Every structure is written in structure tokens, then in C-alpha cells.
């Protein structure tokens, strides 16, 4: 006579409610803490033991809620005869969830080891070579003694980017500078203007320049070109808000 094993017996006493997509079942959550770096760092590993028939098909990055807390799947491993699996989990920030899409794209609210102040939809982090910074931070360039024909690269976009405002100020006697800001994936081309060029004469609080042709697509260079200068101009500053 074949022996039929009731897998629920292993989960009924210590199992907690788990939900992934349309499937809800019990699983046993373990949260062992490890001491790392000479007892300087505490790290928590989250693992879920559950029936393979319930959650054994989950893939990396899939969303799962365990006892009301949101996690994403890191790895799924079979145990013993394969009836049970052990799922390595990554705990998500409160009120955030794994997006469940391919490729897996996470927002700032999914970061549990970084303090983010004032996060808003669409915010991005970028690595500037030294540290991670807000990709939407204002960008600014100062050109000393600007001359007609000056051309300087400002930045290259990693993702589609909308420039919300451009403000310019000049310094000098009877100073006036006309400049253009352009975009293109190829820095050697003429490019497309993303402002309406006009003479800037403000030497105090700066003046706004009309922004056009938005957004700037991913993988495009953005640069500034000086097209006209009059008076004695010692400095031109252009600030860009993204």
C-alpha cells in the first residue's frame, strides 16, 4: 500500500500566511541574524520553507507577502525529496512591493539599506564616480570669459529626462550672452535645440530661458554653445533643473 504523506502537518503549527499572485498558502519563515565584520555588522537572512506545489515555481524578483510583510524572491532551493522548497527572500521597505515585471525594476522606496529623504515618483539614483546621488539634482555650468564658439558638454542622460527650467546669469560691464543648449546621441552633430536662444543680460537674480523639445531621450548628450557675446563678460552661469 502506498504511503500518502500529509504535508500540511509540517506547516499547521508554525506556518504563517503567504501570498504570491493568486496563490495563498502556509509557509514557515526563519529570520536568523548573522554577526559580520568582526561583530560590527548584524545581518538578517530571510528564508521561507513551503510546499513546492505552492511556491516552488517563483522566479528571482517575484513578489511574495509573508505574514503581511512584502518580500522579493532571491533564490528557490529544493529540500530533500523536492516536496518542500526553501526560498531566500529580500525584505522590502514598508508599504513597497516587488514590481513583478521583467526586467525587474525597483524604485527608491524598495531600498531597505539607504535613507532616502523626500522620495517622489520618478526619482532616480546615479553614480557620479564617487557616490550615489539624486539624478534629478540641479545641474550647473559656469563659463569664465565666454567667447562665441564655446561648446561644453553638460551631461549624458541614462534615462528619458525632462528639463523643467533653465536659468542664466552673467557678470561683467554691459554684459550680454546668447547661448543655445542642444541634445543628440552623437556629440559631433549639430544637435537639436532644447531652449529658445535669447540674449541674457541679467547680472543679479538670473533670468529664465524657455525650454522646448522635451523630454531628452535616454543615451543623449546635452551641451551648451555660446553664439553671441557683447560687452565685457567675465562669467556666464547656466543652471538646469530636472
Image: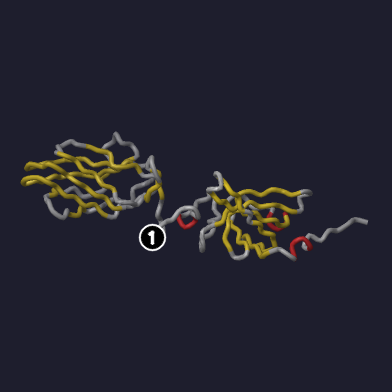
Q: Is residue 192 left or right of residue 111?
A: left
Q: Position of residue 59 (x, y in %)?
A: 62, 50
Element assignment for label 1: loop
Q: Nearer the viewer, residue 190 or 153?
A: 153
* 185 in relation to 162, above or below: above
Instruction: Rate crowding at label 1 as few (under 14), some (14 to 19) or many (20 or more) other CA atoms within 10 Å.
Output: few
The residue furthest right is: 1
For disc 1, the marked residue is 118
Q: Is residue 126 left or right of residue 59?
A: left
How are the colours assigned in the image? Answer: secondary structure
What residue is at 41 percent from the left and 49 percent from the top? 125
Q: Nearer the viewer, residue 195 or 147?
A: 147
What residue is at 44 percent from the left and 55 percent from the top? 115
The residue furthest front is: 39
Q: Position of residue 86 (x, y in %)?
A: 69, 52
Q: Position of residue 172 (x, y in %)?
A: 9, 45
Residue 8, picture quadrant: bottom right
What residue is at 20 percent from the left and 54 percent from the top? 208
Q: Is residue 189 left or right of residue 169?
A: right
Q: Position of residue 220 (x, y in %)?
A: 35, 42
Q: Nearer the viewer, residue 58 or 188?
A: 58
Image quarter in which the N terminus is found: bottom right
Residue 144, picture quadrant: top left
What residue is at 34 percent from the left and 42 percent from the top? 156
Amino acid at each position: 500500500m502506498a504511503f500518502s504523506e500529509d504535508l500540511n502537518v509540517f506547516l499547521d503549527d508554525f506556518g504563517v500566511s503567504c501570498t504570491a499572485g493568486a496563490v495563498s498558502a502556509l509557509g514557515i519563515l526563519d529570520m536568523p541574524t548573522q554577526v559580520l565584520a568582526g561583530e560590527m555588522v548584524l545581518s538578517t537572512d530571510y528564508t521561507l520553507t513551503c510546499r513546492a506545489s505552492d511556491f516552488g515555481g517563483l522566479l528571482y524578483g517575484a513578489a511574495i507577502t509573508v505574514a503581511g510583510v512584502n518580500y522579493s524572491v532571491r533564490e528557490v532551493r529544493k529540500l530533500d525529496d523536492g516536496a518542500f522548497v526553501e526560498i531566500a527572500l529580500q525584505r522590502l521597505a514598508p508599504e513597497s512591493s516587488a514590481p513583478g515585471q521583467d526586467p525587474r525594476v525597483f524604485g527608491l522606496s524598495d531600498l531597505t539599506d539607504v535613507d532616502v529623504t523626500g522620495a517622489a515618483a520618478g526619482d532616480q539614483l546615479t553614480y557620479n564616480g564617487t557616490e550615489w546621488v539624486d539624478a534629478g539634482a540641479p545641474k550647473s555650468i559656469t563659463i569664465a570669459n565666454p567667447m562665441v564658439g564655446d561648446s561644453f558638454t553638460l551631461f549624458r542622460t541614462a534615462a528619458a529626462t525632462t528639463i523643467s527650467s533653465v536659468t542664466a546669469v552673467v557678470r561683467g560691464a554691459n554684459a550680454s550672452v546668447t547661448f543655445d543648449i542642444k541634445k543628440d546621441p552623437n556629440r559631433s552633430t549639430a544637435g537639436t535645440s532644447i531652449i529658445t536662444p535669447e540674449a541674457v543680460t541679467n547680472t543679479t537674480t538670473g533670468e529664465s530661458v524657455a525650454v522646448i523639445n522635451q523630454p531628452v531621450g535616454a543615451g543623449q548628450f546635452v551641451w551648451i554653445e555660446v553664439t553671441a557675446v557683447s560687452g565685457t563678460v567675465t562669467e556666464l552661469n547656466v543652471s538646469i533643473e530636472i
